[in-house]
Image: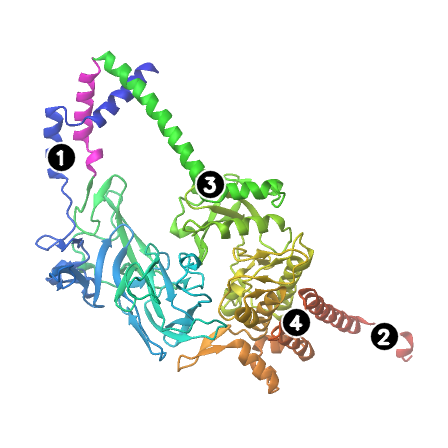
Amino acid sequence: MVLKLVYIIIVMIGRMYPLTCAQYQNQAIISAQNQKETIARFGCDSKCGNVSIPYPFGMRKPKCYASEPFEIECRHNKNGSQGEKLIAPYLKYINLEVMYIDLEYGTVGIKNPIFHPGCDNTSTGINLEGGPFVYSQDYNSFVTVGCQNAALLLSNDTILTACVSVCYDDPKNANMMDVSSCRGKYCCETSLPPYLQAYNVSVGTVEVKSEIKPECGYGLIKADYFQFNYVYDEYNSSYWVPTLGNLKKVKDVPAVLQWEIPIHMPNNSFPEFRTDADSYANYNCSYTNVTSAQSKSGWRCTCKYGFKGNPYLDQGCKLAMEDSPERNKTRLKWAIGVSSSLGTVILLLGLWWLHKVIRKSIATKRKEKFFKQNGGLLLKQRLSSGEVNVDKIKLFSLKDLQKATDHFNINRVLGKGGQGTVYKGMLVDGNIVAVKKFKVNGKVEEFINEFVILSQINHRNVVKLLGCCLETEIPLLVYEFIPNGNLFEYIHGQNEDLPMTWEMRLRISIEVAGALFYLHSAASQPIYHRDIKSRNILLDGKYRAKVADFGASRMVSIEATHLTTTVQGTFGYLDPEYFRTSQLTDKSDVYSFGVVLIELLTGKEPISSAKQQELKSLVSYFLLSMEENRLFDIVDERVMKEAEKEHIVVVANLARRCLELNGKRRPTMKEVALELESIQKSKKQSAAQEQHEELELPGIDDFQL
């Protein structure tokens, strides 16, 4: 054991002082020359300005790039501080400047235009269709900036997502600014849809009860690592600008594209190697589906472990210098020479032990720092006050959650929203869980809020919180895994194997109504969800509803009738009375549930667009159809076939009451749940009576002898 420890220390010495031996130094130089990395084809330029251009990308000659979409054009820009010309690469076929190219992850950093549609609701956009590039859903977000603005992200006249940013107070007050998380105040941030290639942006104004007048807004797609922070403009006391400068003057922001080699590309485009290389090759190639959800659309290659370089070139992947036999042999020879000095070994043994102690101390301090940073002290205060049920909550270690999620692999992502990203994971005991990594940017109120609220809830139709992890830079929550996605996907997606029957729609609406009634009336303290929508209603293995996403929820005292707070919610589901007054009540959840109810009844999305790209509200369309006695024209075809018309009318009238502009006229969630349950009971009684009539046997008097 002692000899083994001595050998380890000797090897450590070799790593710490590699250039003290002339023989080792000469061998390292020779090895470095042999291992010089090649990223471009022979005879092709590998750099434009400060950006490396690896094959399959290339410049000037057709042989230097795989196909036209991968052609890079080196241009001179007048972007220097003194107006000097700078050299920058551009993707020629889409005319966008390239910031970097990453072969390992298959990404390209670009400078993406900021659209300034102005106040006339005009719209402009970008089209990548026909090429191997898409806007990455994992690394980008759609952002709206401005006061009283609604921005739509569209593709081929279809709304993909929308964001509303409002201002209620004077932007001069720096302490009131809250833009780091972009949750709707001064700016709004939402996730991108997958496989996005073509899009355009439309910006309009919304009416808000505020003294701040609407201003021309901006809609943009930006990389997640690019953050907005606001500073005061000394030259114009009435104007706020982001640190990157006045948005009116800025042309672009960083964004990330993903790419793949098209599957239909001829083999002779890559004469150096075959994509079906045998096991002895030093690279791996696999099929991908970056640009299409239907099937494999292309492929990407990576160097095998222990190799580095460009896998798209012949012999492009070379043995890493650190693992080369020459380096290991030289290190061993040098280490044997050092072993003669026993005093050095003892000294280094002490240093090694001291190093371990220091590392352990640093790790402990980092955990304490993250614990405080992620609201650990606030959480301890809640624990001591009895607000959190400790028996139900488990503290997970970061190591366990990293192992469960394969180090938070992007292939494990279940969903991504304004609060953070949710990953699928498997614990050591075999249980499947969902792990939410919060995007808090130093603000932990939403994380603590969701943790405290879910720890108080015990209802079969509310997602169950299993535990949390506070010893990492970003706080983590662990929930039960809900396997069948969300209600929005189930209503609006095509699922012929398990169609959305009237019976299932009615049952799901009863389950959600019961969960909200529990939150409003049966919980230890009333809880207002604030973001009820079909995307926040998950479906378990038996397609039972589970209400989720409590980051925006609020607890109120039993005596309070309302809570004044900053408006939060989702466009299309947001209570207009709450939007105007900023006073949150239980009736705001009733309004949002009413939108979900007509979504179930009609099968239509809460917002849609006409050919003129105007915003079309499902609520307005539904109420107008009710007034004009055209209800059955907008009801889903399957509902019309399976449900009795009198039941459809009852549900529609209930939804209309939930959507009253005056919150006092809306029913409570208890009344809503009871009325839906009565419809279900009536349906079951009617079915039982019909079955009884069919099975009734004739009497003796009915026979003639």
Q: Is residue 174 magenta?
A: no
The N terminus - image quarter: top left
Q: What residue is shown with label 3? A: 372
Q: What residue is shown with label 2? A: 698
Q: What residue is shown with label 4? A: 664
Sequence-wise, which precedes: disc 1 or disc 4?
1
The reply to whether residue 341 is visible in this rendering is yes
**Which range is magenta?**
320-340
Q: CA distance from mark 1 to mark 3?
A: 48 Å
Foreground tag (1 vs 4): 4
Sequence-wise, which precedes: disc 3 or disc 4?
3
Q: Do the residues under discs 1 and 2 have CB atoms within 8 angstroms?
A: no
Q: Residue at x 68, y 76 (%)?
A: 650
Looking at the picture, how far across and down is residue 434, in whole percent? Answer: 50, 50
Q: Is residue 109 above or below residue 681?
A: above
Q: Is residue 108 above or below residue 625?
A: above
Sequence-wise, which precedes: disc 1 or disc 2?
1
Q: What amino acid is found at the position of numbered circle 1 in the picture?
A: Ser
Sequence-wise, which precedes: disc 1 or disc 3?
1
Looking at the picture, how far across and down is residue 168, in whole percent? Answer: 47, 67
User: Could you say whether the residue bearing mark 3 is in a helix, strand or loop?
Assistant: helix
Q: What amino acid is found at the position of numbered circle 3 in the picture?
A: Lys
Q: Identify the main secondary structure in magenta.
A: helix
User: Could you say whether the residue bearing mark 1 is in a helix, strand or loop?
Assistant: helix
